[in-house]
Image (cartoon, grey):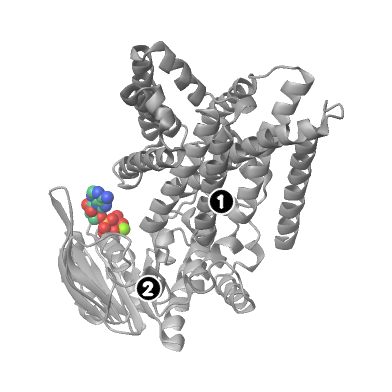
C-alpha cells in the first residue's frame, strides 16, 4: 500500500511532466511555418520567461504555505506583489523614469528584495507571534496590506509625469512579447541562486509543515528556516512580479491542484508537481490563447478568473482552516 | 537528569508558571498532576524548549535547552503535546517515520524502518499504518502520536496527557509500556496525568502543581493522601490501600 502510494505519486508526476512537455513543444512549434532561425530564439526567450514565472510562483506559494501551515494564504494574497508594484512606482515617482532606467537592474533587485524582506518581517510578527491565530483575520490583514499598497501606487501614478507613467506601465506589466533580456538573465540567476539555498534546507520542509512545535521538537531551527524561506519567497515574488506584474490567485490555484493530485504531502513530490502544473497553465494557456484564438494579453485574465473561482470555492467548501 | 531552576512564564500580567525549581532523576516515571490551568503543560513546553522561559533555566543532562542546538536536543528529548493537529494529510506510518528525522533527516534507513515497525507494534498500530490520521478514532490518533515520540527513541520522553481518549485497556497498556521503557531501556519518562490513580500505581515520583507553583513532590505514598489531594483539587478524596497501591476514591 505504501509502495503503491509511492508508485502512484511517481506515475502522476510523470503524467504531469508529459503534459508540461507537450505544452512546451506545442508552444515552440505551432504556427512556426518553417522560419526556425527566427522563431526558435524568439519563442525560446518567451518560454524561458514563462517558465521562470511558473517556477517562481509555484515554489514561493508552496513554501509560504508550508511555513505558515495553511493552504489558503499565499504571498500574493498577503500583498507581496502589490508591494513590488508600489516600490516600482515610488522609484519612478522619486527619481523620474530616466534616472530609474539608468539604475543598474541588479542594484534595483537588491533594494526591492531588501524592502520585501522587511515587509516579511512585519508579516512574520503577525503570523508567528501567536497573537493572530485566526486565519480569516490574517486574510483580512493581507487584503488590507494589498489594498494599501495598490491604492498608494495608484495615487502616486496619478501624480507622475505622463511620460514617466508610460515607462512605469511598461515595467509593471511587461508583456511576454517584449521581455528585457537583461532582466531575464538576472531573474534566471536569482532563481538559480535561491533554489540552491532552498535545496540545502529541502529536508526541513516536510517537518516544517507539521507545525512549529513539532518541528522544534524534531530538532529543526524553526526560526532560522522560516526566515530563510521568507527571504526565498521575497526573491521569487520579485522575479515573477518583475516579469509579469502582480498575479493574485495563480499560486493558490497551482499549489492546491498539486495537493489534490498528489497522493502524498511530501515536498519531494508536491513541489515538482506544483511547478509543472504552473508550466502547463502558463505555457499551455499562452499557446492556446495566442496560437489558437490569436489573443495576446488575455492569459493573465483567464488565469486570475480561474484562480479566483477556485479561491471562492475553497473558502465556501470550508477547506480553509 | 532534568534540572530546572526558577522557571517562570508570564502572560500579560498573569504568572502561569511561577519560579518552579526541581530535579527529575534519570530513569523512572515522574508524573505531574494538578488542576486545570495549574501550568503543567506550560512547564512541560518550557522543558522541551517549545516556549522560552521568561526567567530560569532548564538543563537536560547538563545541557541548557535554551542554548543547545535543536539537533542535539532532538536526539535526547522528545515530547508529546496535549493538542496535536496537522494541516498536512499524513498516514500513521508517515507520522511515526518523522520520529526518525533527528537521525536520518528524512532519508529512512533500514535501521529507521525497524524502529518505526517496533513503535507501531508497541502501540498496536500495525494494521493502521497506511490509514490517514483523519481516518482514525481519537484514541487511535493519540496512539499514533505516542508512537512517533517513541520512535524518536530519546533518553528523556515527555508526555502531556498521553492517556487522553484512550480506553481503559489501552490506558493501562500505555502506562505499562512507559514503565517498561523506563525499566528495561533506562528511559526517563515524564507524564502529565489527570487520573491520580494512574499516577499512584505507575510512577516513581509525583510532582503536584497548583496555581503555577510546585506545590508538593514526593513518592506516590507521600502524595496520594486525602489531605494533599483535597488541598490540590479542592474536593473530597478518600484514599484506600488496595493490592499494595494507594487508590483514591473521589466519587462522592
Ligand atoms: N498562550 C497563552 N496565553 C495566555 N495564557 C495562557 C497561554 N497558554 C496558557 N495560558 C494560561 O496559563 C495557565 C496554565 O496553562 P497550562 O496549559 O499550562 O495548564 P495545564 O496545567 O496544562 O492545564 P490542563 O490540565 O487544563 O491541561 C492557564 O491559566 C492558561 O489559561
Ligand atoms: Mg495541559
What is the spatial separation of the Cα atoms under label 2 and label 1, in whole angstroms?
33 Å
Query: Would you call the spot at circle 2 few (<14 residues within 10 Å), some (14-19), or many (20 or more)?
Result: many
Both on one chain, marks 2 and 1? no
The image shows residue A50 at horizontal and vertical percentages of: 64, 35
- Name the subunit of mark 2: B
Using the rendered image of the protein, determine whether residue A136 is visible from the camera's viewpoint: yes
> Residue B163 location, x and y as percent?
42, 64
Q: Quadrant of ligand 2?
A: bottom left
Left or right? Give the position of A209 relative to B247: right
Give B26 or A250, whichever is nearer the viewer. A250
Q: Is residue A109 above or below residue A164?
A: below
Of the numbered discs in the image, which one, if any, rests on residue B73?
2
Q: Residue at x 48, y 73 (%)?
A: B152
**Horizontal side of residue A192 vs B43, given as left or right:** right
Residue A243 x/y as whole percent = 55, 32
Q: Is residue A317 visible?
A: no
Provide the secondary structure element on which disc 2 rests.
helix
Residue A59 placement, left or right of A124:
right
From the viewer's perspective, is B113 left or right of A31?
Answer: left
Amino acid at each position: 500500500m505504501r509502495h503503491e502510494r509511492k508508485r502512484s505519486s511517481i506515475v502522476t508526476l510523470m503524467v504531469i511532466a508529459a503534459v508540461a512537455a507537450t505544452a512546451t513543444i506545442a508552444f515552440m512549434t505551432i504556427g512556426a511555418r518553417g522560419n526556425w532561425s527566427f522563431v526558435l530564439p524568439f519563442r525560446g526567450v518567451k518560454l524561458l520567461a514563462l517558465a521562470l514565472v511558473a517556477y517562481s510562483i509555484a515554489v514561493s506559494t508552496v513554501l509560504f504555505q508550508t511555513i505558515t501551515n495553511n493552504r489558503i494564504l499565499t504571498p500574493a494574497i498577503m500583498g507581496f506583489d502589490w508591494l513590488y508594484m508600489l516600490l516600482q512606482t515610488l522609484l519612478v515617482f522619486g527619481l523620474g523614469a530616466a534616472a530609474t532606467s539608468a539604475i543598474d537592474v541588479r542594484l534595483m533587485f537588491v533594494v526591492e528584495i531588501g524592502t520585501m524582506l522587511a515587509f516579511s518581517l512585519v508579516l512574520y510578527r503577525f503570523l508567528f507571534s501567536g497573537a493572530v491565530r485566526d486565519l480569516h483575520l490574517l486574510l483580512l490583514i493581507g487584503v488590507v496590506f494589498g489594498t494599501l499598497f495598490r491604492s498608494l501606487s495608484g495615487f502616486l501614478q496619478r501624480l507622475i509625469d505622463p511620460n514617466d507613467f508610460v515607462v512605469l506601465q511598461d515595467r509593471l506589466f511587461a508583456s511576454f512579447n517584449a521581455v528585457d533580456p537583461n532582466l531575464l538573465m538576472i531573474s534566471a540567476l536569482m532563481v538559480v541562486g535561491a533554489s540552491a539555498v532552498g535545496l540545502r534546507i529541502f529536508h526541513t520542509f516536510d517537518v516544517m509543515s507539521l507545525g512549529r512545535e513539532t518541528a522544534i521538537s524534531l530538532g529543526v531551527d524553526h526560526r532560522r528556516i522560516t526566515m530563510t524561506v521568507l527571504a526565498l519567497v521575497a526573491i521569487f515574488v520579485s522575479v515573477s512580479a518583475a516579469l509579469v506584474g502582480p498575479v493574485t490567485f495563480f499560486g493558490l490555484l497551482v499549489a492546491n491542484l498539486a495537493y489534490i493530485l498528489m497522493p502524498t504531502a511530501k515536498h519531494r513530490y508536491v513541489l515538482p508537481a506544483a511547478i509543472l502544473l504552473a508550466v502547463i497553465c502558463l505555457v499551455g494557456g499562452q499557446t492556446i490563447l495566442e496560437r489558437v484564438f490569436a489573443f495576446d494579453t488575455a492569459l493573465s485574465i483567464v488565469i486570475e478568473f480561474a484562480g479566483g473561482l477556485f479561491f471562492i470555492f475553497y473558502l465556501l467548501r470550508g477547506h480553509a482552516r | 537528569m532534568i534540572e530546572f531552576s526558577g522557571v517562570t512564564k508570564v502572560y500579560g500580567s498573569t504568572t502561569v508558571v511561577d519560579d518552579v525549581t526541581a530535579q527529575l532523576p534519570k530513569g523512572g516515571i515522574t508524573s505531574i498532576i494538578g488542576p486545570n490551568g495549574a501550568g503543567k503543560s506550560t512547564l512541560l513546553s518550557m522543558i522541551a524548549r517549545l516556549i522560552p522561559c521568561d526567567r530560569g533555566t532548564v538543563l537536560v543532562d547538563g545541557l541548557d535547552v535554551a542554548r543547545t542546538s535543536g539537533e542535539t536536543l532532538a536526539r535526547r528529548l522528545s515530547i508529546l503535546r496535549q493538542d496535536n493537529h496537522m494541516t498536512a494529510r499524513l498516514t500513521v506510518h508517515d507520522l511515526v517515520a518523522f520520529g526518525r528525522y533527528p537521525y536520518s533527516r528524512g532519508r529512512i534507513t533500514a535501521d529507521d524502518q525497524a524502529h518505526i515497525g517496533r513503535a507501531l507494534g508497541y502501540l498496536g498500530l500495525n494494521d493502521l499504518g497506511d490509514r490517514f490520521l483523519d481516518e482514525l478514532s481519537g484514541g487511535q490518533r493519540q496512539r499514533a502520536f505516542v508512537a512517533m515520540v517513541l520512535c524518536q527513541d530519546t533518553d528523556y520522553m515527555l508526555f502531556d496527557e498521553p492517556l487522553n481518549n484512550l480506553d481503559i485497556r489501552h490506558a493501562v497498556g500505555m502506562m505499562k509500556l512507559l514503565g517498561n521503557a523506563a525499566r528495561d531501556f533506562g528511559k526517563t519518562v515524564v507524564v502529565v496525568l489527570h487520573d491520580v490513580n494512574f499516577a499512584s500505581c505507575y510512577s516513581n515520583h509525583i510532582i503536584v502543581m497548583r496555581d503555577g507553583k510546585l506545590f508538593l513532590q514526593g513518592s506516590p505514598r507521600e502524595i496520594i493522601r486525602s489531605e494533599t489531594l483535597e488541598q490540590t483539587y479542592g474536593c473530597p478524596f478518600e484514599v484506600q490501600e488496595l493490592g499494595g497501591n494507594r487508590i483514591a476514591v473521589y466519587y462522592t
